[in-house]
Image (cartoon, rainbow, N blue to C red):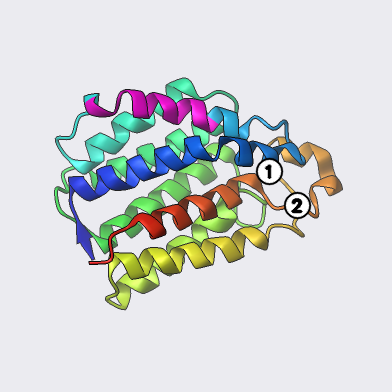
Amino acid sequence: MSGSITDVEFVMRNLADNIVANETYFGELDAVVGDGDFGYSLARGFEIVIENWDSYDRSDPGVFITKIAAAVSARIGGTSGPIWGTAMLRAGVQLKEHPQIEGTDVVRALRASIEGIKARGQADLGDKTLLDALVPATDTLEAEVNAGHSGAEALAAMAVTARSAADATKPMQAMRGRAAYTGERSIGSVDAGAMAIAVLLEGLAVAWPTN
């Protein structure tokens, strides 16, 4: 499992397109216990990425991702901008000066993203956030890489894990973000951020070439 700047471009463009396409759905998920602006905020940030797609520095994969992170952070308001921007920035830093990316590099980048989200959002596993899908999905990726599986196989496995983990947030009580203010009312609905991770990984898995 290895890749280059072309693969990173494919991933980031797929994520951007799917975030914009799922604006309404993500907003509906968030509206159950939040203020419903999650889908709107993410879509506005990644619309900018799509509009300025050709202008981002592609000198190496890490630089490319950090430029996108800066654009998203500057555009998205509320809590989503800092969280998603930090996640991408931390990943980009890990991938700088890595023109050829191995599976272990992706795992390291995602681990850095997770630590950035934890620090920025003061959140952890079990707090009913996107971490509850992202962490187990990253664990699955690491297992797939260690097993020598292909990128397509790894993404498919990550998507299955993320969907199951996102569904498992339903009985949790939100401990972070605006949903936390609703207390026990947050129990009974999935976390919007966790489900977004699942949807995005599923979209990426479907689009990823199998050969």
Q: Which residue is drawn at 56% across and 52% down?
A: 131
Q: What residue is shown at x 14% (from left), y 48% (from top)?
A: 99
In reply to whether residue 37 is colored magenta, the answer given is: no
> Label 1, label 2: how many angstroms apart (C-alpha)?
8 Å
Q: Position of residue 90 (x, y in %)?
A: 37, 41
Give the vertical position of 151 relative to 66 (above or below). below
Magenta stretch contains residue 45: yes
Q: Earlier in the sequence, mark 1 or mark 2?
A: 1
| Three-letter code for the amino acid on which mark 2 is drawn | Ser
At x 52%, y 66%, the residue is 161
Q: Residue 25 vs residue 17: left or right?
A: right
| Residue 66 in the image, given as x and y percentages of width and height | 31, 34
Q: Name the side, left or right, on which 16 lies relative to 100.
A: right
The residue that mark 1 highlights is: 29
For the point 72% across and 46% down, the residue is 175
Residue 100 in the image, given as x and y percentages of width and height: 15, 53
What number of labels is visible? 2
Q: Give the range drawn in magenta.
A: 42-54
Check contact, mark 1 vs mark 2: CB within 8 A. Answer: yes
Query: The residue tagged with tag 1: helix, strand or loop?
Result: helix
Residue 154 falls in which quadrant of the image?
bottom left
Q: Which mark is residue 189?
A: 2
Extreme residue toward the bottom, this view: 147
